[in-house]
Image (tube, rainbow, N blue to C red):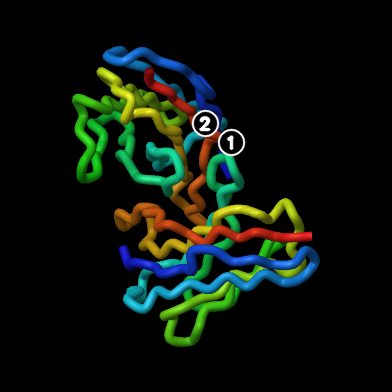
């Protein structure tokens, strides 16, 4: 399965600022997804990162707040814009080669704290 | 994607088998059953998946009932490191638009 690296692993941010999280996969993958995990909660899917086109967002998530890029088959970014304390969460990148077992692999996550 | 129902929490003695149930009574014929776990402060880890037949790998066994409406994940010899939240998820293949949607999962505590 793919190996996923996320940066930063954690950060403390000020209200009103934006932060970009990077996700690097060690091999080409078909599918990439971004999830959010709020404190004490399960994971919530934010969007599917589509290579070469706009991301597909889940209900409750919008591009202006969570712009996503996916310039190639191994890299994606998620930006959390105009942050508020409610955005304090772990953000996780995941990827699948989309063939064979179709296993989705996750990064370790980026823990954001907004003050 | 079909919804799943899992117990909120379970305990298991170290060295014993941990049997985690999952109900997915509305599963469709083309939906797989996946199990993931999340150890505290880590990303979710894939455990096993299946469609119709029982499956076994180095981590666990997956038993799916004949009508596919429920399944059981078996950790044959639980250790303290197996303490985690276990998620049962059903979905169609990614190529058919399937997405991994997490429920609340079962919090498994393995005790000495």
Chain for disc number 1: A
Please name whichever residue, B102 or A74, is drawn nearer the observer in this view of the structure: B102
Quarter of the rendering occupied by the C terminus of chain B: bottom right
Q: Residue at x 45, y 33 (%)?
A: A90
Quarter of the rendering occupied by the N terminus of chain B: bottom left
Numbered label attached to residue A25? 2
Q: Residues within 10 Å of mark 1 (few under 14, many from 20)?
A: few
Pinpoint residue B29: horizontal percent, then vertical percent.
35, 76
Q: Residue at x 40, y 54 (%)?
A: B102
Query: Badge 1 is on which residue?
Result: A3
Pinpoint residue B25: horizontal percent, then vertical percent.
36, 78
Q: Residues within 10 Å of mark 2 (few under 14, many from 20)?
A: many
Residue B10 visible in the displayed image: yes
| Residue B90 image-quadrant placement | bottom left
Chain for disc number 2: A
**Taking B50 as reference, is A69 left or right?**
left
SS type, badge 2: strand
| Residue B60 image-quadrant placement | bottom right
């Amino acid at each position: 399965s793919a190996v996923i690296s996320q940066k930063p692993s954690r950060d403390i941010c000020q209200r009103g600022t934006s932060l970009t999280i990077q996700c690097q996969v060690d091999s080409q993958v078909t599918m990439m997804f971004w999830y959010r995990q709020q404190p004490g909660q399960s994971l919530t899917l934010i969007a599917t990162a589509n290579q070469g086109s706009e991301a597909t967002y889940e209900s409750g998530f919008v591009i202006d707040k969570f712009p996503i890029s996916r310039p190639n088959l191994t890299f994606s970014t998620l930006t959390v814009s105009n942050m508020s304390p409610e955005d304090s969460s772990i953000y996780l990148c995941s990827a699948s080669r989309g063939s064979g077992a179709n296993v989705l692999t996750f990064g370790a996550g980026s823990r954001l704290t907004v003050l | 994607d079909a919804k799943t129902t899992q117990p909120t929490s379970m305990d298991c003695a170290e060295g014993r088998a941990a049997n985690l149930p999952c109900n997915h009574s509305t599963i469709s014929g083309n939906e797989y059953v996946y199990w993931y776990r999340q150890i505290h402060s880590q990303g979710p880890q894939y455990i096993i998946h299946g469609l119709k037949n029982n499956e076994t790998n180095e981590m666990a066994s997956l038993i799916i009932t004949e009508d596919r409406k429920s399944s059981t994940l078996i950790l044959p010899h639980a250790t303290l490191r197996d303490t985690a939240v276990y998620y049962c998820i059903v979905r169609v293949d990614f190529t058919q638009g399937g997405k991994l949607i997490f429920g609340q999962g079962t919090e498994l505590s393995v005790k000495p």
